[in-house]
Every structure is written in structure tokens, then in C-alpha cells.
Amino acid sequence: MAANQTVNIYGKIAPTYIEQIPVGSRRAIFGLNFPLGENRDRGGFFSKISGVRMIKDAVTQLLLTTRGERVMLPKYGCNLRKFLFQPLDETTFESIKREILYSFYNYIVGAKVKKLAVFPFGDAGPAGGNSLKVVLTLELTKGDLDVFDVEVNIV
């Protein structure tokens, strides 16, 4: 049997077509625009995005989701709200860093973390004083290698 042929369920040979992609071209990764329905006039309710904006939206959604909140993905998200009333010392920072990096490398495709910073969110934040600001400096892994920041406030 030839290398470019496969056998289907009934034993007949069906040709397999291999898509040839030029060496210099690359495929873009697309995701859903977050929040849904934001650009109904330019792409419908489920419009798609790619690049830096897609990564920023995915990271924001990941950091603001508590583990167990999504029914079909119970391990998706970060448990960052449990750190709101903890002292922001080296031990807490290492726990926050482990939590974010574990979730990031399991669920975010197309970027890597260059720097991670956690700050108290002002003296009297929106939650009455206990809030955190997480700043991630990310770099795209393919293409232009853009470096950008994602800021998320945990209240």
C-alpha cells in the first residue's frame, strides 16, 4: 500500500491529501472575542480575535475565574481571591506566583511569562481595602515576539 493512501472502514483505499504550507508562512491562532457580543456590528455575536488582544483577554479571563467555577473545566482558573486577606509577604507572593504560573502554562497558548508582579491595590480599594493588582509581562511565542503587559485587579 502506498504511503499516501489509507484504508477506510470498509476496506477500500481512499487517498490522503497532505496540505503543503510554505515555509515562510504561519497560521494565526484565533479565539472568541471577550466579552461575547461586544462587536455585534463587525463580526456577529461570536466574533473572533487573534494576536495580542486574544492573549490579553484569555489571561484576564483565566485570572478572574475561580477554580471549580466552570462546569466542564473544573481545574480552569486561579484561586487568587483566597489571597486577598493574607499579608503580602514573600511566602504569599510565592504562592500567588505558583498559582498563576500553573494555570497559565496549562491553559494559555501562544505566549510566555517574562515578568510577574503583585501589588496591593491602593489603601482603600473597591473591596474596602483588600485588593490585589497582578501585572504580567508577556511575550508572544510565535511571529513578531511582541512584549506586552496584562493588568488584572483582584477585588
Image (spheres, grey):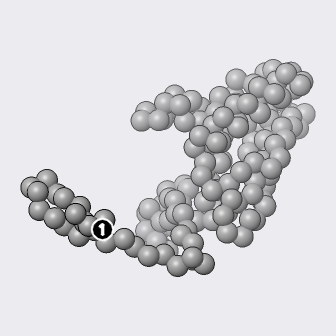
Please give left or right for residue 25 compared with residue 154 in the image: left
Quadrant in which residue 82 is drawn:
top right
Residue most extreme to the left: 10
- Where disc 1 sits, the SS reads loop
Please identify the quadrant where the N terminus is shown.
Answer: bottom left
Q: Residue at x 86, y 34 (%)?
A: 120
Closest to the observer, 47 or 112: 112
Residue drawn at (65%, 48%), measured in percent from left and top?
59
Q: Quadrant of residue 12?
A: bottom left
Is residue 65 at all visible to an observer of this figure?
no
Depth check, front residue: 132 or 58: 58
Q: Residue at x 19, y 58 (%)?
A: 7
Classify mark 1: residues with Cα within 10 Å, few (<14), some (14-19) or many (20+).
few
Q: Amino acid at mark 1?
A: Asn
Residue 75 visible to the viewer: yes
The percent coordinates of residue 13 (x first, y second) are 16, 64
Task: Give coordinates of residue 102: x percent, y percent.
Answer: 66, 34
Residue 129 position in % (x across, y down): 83, 29
**Relative to 123, residue 7 above or below:** below
Quadrant in which the C terminus is drawn: top right
Q: Which residue is mark 1?
A: 4
